[in-house]
Image (tube, rainbow, N blue to C red):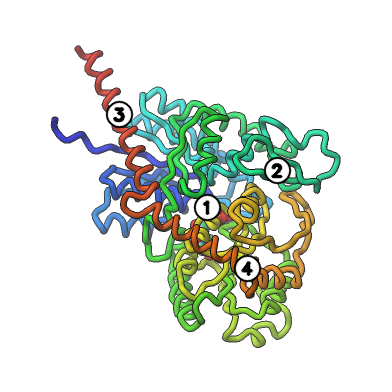
Amino acid sequence: DADPLPLRIFFIPFFATGHLIPLVDVARLFAARGVDSTILVTPTNAALIRVTVDAAAAGGLPLRTLIYPFPSAESGLPPGVENISDLPSEESYKIDLAAPFTRPAHEQLLRLHRPDAVVSDVHFPWTALVARDLCVPRFLFTAVGLFPVSVVTSVRQHRPHAGVARDDEPVLVPDLPHPVFLTRSELPEFLRRDVPLRRFRDEYMEAETASAGVIVNSFAEMEASYSEYYLRARGLRSWFVGPVSLATSNAGLRGGGDAAASANRTRCLSWLSAQAPRSVVYACFGSWCRFTNEQLREMAQGLEASGRPFLWVVREEDGQEWMPQGFEQRVEGRGLVLPGWAPQVDVLGHEATGAFLTHCGWNSLLEGAAGGMPMVTWPLSTEQFINEKLVVAVLQVGVRASERCRSTVDDEPHVVRAEELARAVGKIMDGGEEAEGIRRRARELGEKAGQAVREDGSSVKGLSDLIAEIRDWQGKKKDVAADVVG
Ligand code: UDP
């Protein structure tokens, strides 16, 4: 037999950095296996991934972008606003509302280029229809793991909170591989009230059912039982290919490839090299969530009171408003407050970093796990409260920043007090059996994550299986074509 034709796959990421970064990494993994990989992306999002894509292409990988316009006029968003991090947190839904206007561009590009497979973010359900027309498989990319997907699936199916009087009463989520308790306030907003985005969810579910399966940035050693649950509950297969942050190395500029991010990288890494091994608390809350000034002040005081060195990434501008008086002088040398973008994967892989204060965004959770980090969890919105359960209750590699019930949809979120934060940091950094257990489990999880992406690892095999699957489709399609011609 002649060599099979190279596969061509199109990847379509959503307009959020936490969706963009891992899907670009997935595309790069395919490219590293010789798959011709094209990322469909809008102009300002293309700029966020340019460094990564250019580096891959310069290294000879068949990875490229195909740029299409963001539907600014149709959606009423100002030109250049193309990513949820371009808007205040409470307006991020406007990007979701803009997504359907990208349908014509996606359809046109897919029909024109006829790739062998489409890997689509969950926000673009129509890609399932186009793929069906083209007789190619459409894979779903959820940007989160199968633990949160399974929890949401079960809650939708069983509605365990119906009839529960109190919002802060923990309720068992039925049928999952582990006992998971969630309060109603911890559910993502779309499961709790009729928000504008709710109607989209049904469309996403239909497209999910019509997909060939799900590609997941996670690894079997952490989530295999949820892959089985998902197959049982939804009849859909899944392939683990992560942690993608370990499988690809990209100079720490993922999602922040500008001069400021580059300067931050140098600053962070040289500061970290002057710190003792495993001593630093790294605090970062993803790409788009923001805090009130009151909360930032408490956080500053909490980090100071923890007595530990800290590296704190702050996305809010104007430190004058919230910074406690004399804070910078008091913590000089011990604390680094970094405005903007940190090279997170490098920081979490650095030997000086000893703990991760995280909002439990899926990528952060996985990057923390991959770095063997014990975590202090501080969820803020969406499925982050569910992810927190995985860290604290299931894997037991972290503690909560605050024991008080908090919520995904509070208009006035509870403020986490400085004492609570300092206590939580102490719980994982101090001596004592509990802390040592958490640190040991975190270290072991990091080792398993590393093995998953090494030769013969579970995620390397996951990717091979997936490529074989797509080749099968390609073969079948050719057979059909030959029949038609014959
Ligand atoms: N990130 C980073 N530097 C920062 C903030 C975020 O590199 O200063 C990266 C982080 O490594 C992760 C992504 O941005 O890959 C954020 O995704 P996550 O799912 O954790 O959170 P989201 O931004 O979606 O809330």
Q: Give the image location of residue 417, x and y in percent.
A: 77, 68
The residue that mark 2 highlights is: 189
The residue that mark 4 highlights is: 435
The residue that mark 3 highlights is: 472
In the rendered image, the residue lying farthest to the left is 2
Q: Residue at x 60, y 61 (%)?
A: 358
Q: Residue at x 79, y 34 (%)?
A: 162
On the rendered structure, is 2 left or right of 433?
A: left
Q: Give the image location of residue 355, x and y in percent.
A: 57, 69
Q: Alpha-carbon neighbours of circle 1 within 10 Å: few (<14), some, or many (≥20)?
A: many
For the residues labelled 3 and 2, the Cα–Cα distance comes to 40 Å
For the residues labelled 4 and 3, the Cα–Cα distance comes to 49 Å
For the residues labelled 2 and 4, the Cα–Cα distance comes to 33 Å
Is ligand 1 within 8 Å of the beta carbon of the residue shown at mark 1? yes
The residue that mark 1 highlights is: 18
**Mark 1 vs mark 4: which is more N-terminal?**
1
The relative height of residue 92 versus residue 158 in the rendered view (above or below) is below
Kind of residue at disc 1 = Gly
For the residues labelled 3 and 1, the Cα–Cα distance comes to 31 Å
Q: Alpha-carbon neighbours of circle 3 within 10 Å: few (<14), some, or many (≥20)?
A: few
Q: Secondary structure at mark 2?
A: helix
**Mark 4 vs mark 3: which is more N-terminal?**
4
